[in-house]
Image (tube, helix red, strand yellow):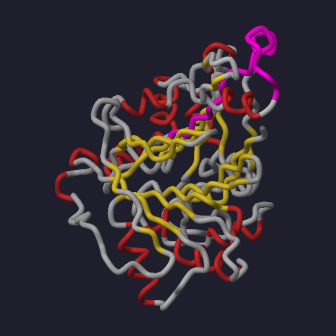
Amino acid sequence: MSMDVTFLGTGAAYPSPTRGASALVLRCEGECWLFDCGEGTQTQLMKSQLKAGRITKIFITHLHGDHFFGLPGLLCTISLQSSPTGTKQPVDIYGPVGLRDFLQHTMELSHTELVFPYAVHELVPTADQCPADEQPGITHGERTGCRPGAGQGRTIHLDTEEDAYLLVDEEQFVVKAFRLFHRIPSFGLSIMEKRPGKLNAQKLKDLGVPPGPAYGKLKNGISVVLENGVTISPQDVLKKPVVGRKICILGDCSGVVGDGGVELCLEADLLIHEATLDDTQMDKAKERGHSTPRMAAAFANRCQAKRLVLTHFSQRYKPVALAKEGETDGTANLKKQAESVCEHREVTLAEDFMVISIPIQK
């Protein structure tokens, strides 16, 4: 099963002629999941090889404009490009408390009715995710009178035992969120692929399981009862599960809150981490709730990530292709800073429209 990540916007604060605002897409078997949706994301999508209509899930890491101001426009454009007969799949949107009201008010003020259903699932932050004087005054009471097509969605609280939020648990993937420290509540996301063990053909034959629907049930974890009354459990005929791929995406932060983030990112195949400013401005970065290459690399070391991708660069840093030889304000210097502390793991600088494939683990 092919899987890749496309970076649509890798800049901080605002879109520029050389970098779009924060947005990336995880694509797997034709389905697309969007992570953050800064202003201009729909234009970036049109310039890419992706199709906006295939987006079925959207994850917003935090409610700063460069991460979600593009969301209402994108939803409207997808609706305009969709068939009015309702063939577009529903869209599930995940983000911090306040996102549901934002979309609800935006759709009401613009008198917009989407031709596809959507639901906003809100994560309830904890008090230690941002400075005390910047705690959001947002309530998360239930709204009534949703516009047509807008599902109420879930309100998701922290699982204190696991120190994580369970967002998605489907046949192929589990998605969990963890807390980050920023100027407002921000979250990281861990996308883990499920790869159950293959069916043991010889055991199936020995136990007398006939080919057909029973095979599918067993592979999906469902026990079957044979005609002779014998119950066959999945563990009787499945080989050892294969370790699935793991992609971790961090919103803006100057660090993680608690140990949940480290556990969820452990041995990630791809760790995508912001590096807004260079290491010489670490104090400034921390003051603004951001990270530097050294900080990102230290977290990659801590969770033993296999590959680190730096993104969310201040607009002052020129893309590698535009930086002149000898200039110190290009992103190439950020890569060197991360590599100086990374423990033999690959470091990549994200650029708009870069595509990174995540191969299946052998």
Nearer to me, 314 or 184:
184
Where is residue 42 shown, x and y percent of the image?
65, 72
Magenta highlight on residue 210:
yes
Up-down relation of residue 135 to residue 83 (above or below):
above
Direction from residue 195 to residue 192 in the image, left or right: left
> Residue drawn at (63%, 39%), measured in percent from left and top?
172
The boundaries of the magenta stretch are 190-211
Q: Position of residue 91 (x, y in %)?
A: 57, 64
Q: Can residue 83 be seen in the rendering of this structure?
A: yes
Looking at the image, which is closer to me, 20 or 139? 139
Q: Which residue is farthest left?
A: 133
The N terminus is located in which quarter?
Answer: top right
Is residue 294 found left or right of 155 in the rendered image?
right
Count how many numbered circles sit on residues in the image: 0
Q: In which quarter of the image is residue 241?
A: top right
User: Residue lying furthest front in this view?
Assistant: 228
Instruction: State the image coordinates of residue 71 (x, y, percent, origin top left).
Output: 53, 71
Q: Residue at x 74, y 28 (%)?
A: 215
Residue 100 is drawn in which quadrant? bottom left
Quarter-wise, where is residue 80 in the image?
Answer: bottom right
The answer to whether residue 288 of the structure is visible from this angle is no
| Location of residue 246 with respect to 136 vertically, above or below | above
Closest to the observer, 310 or 94: 94
Image coordinates of residue 174 in percent, x first then y, are 54, 39
362 inside magenta stretch: no
Image quadrant containing the C terminus: top right
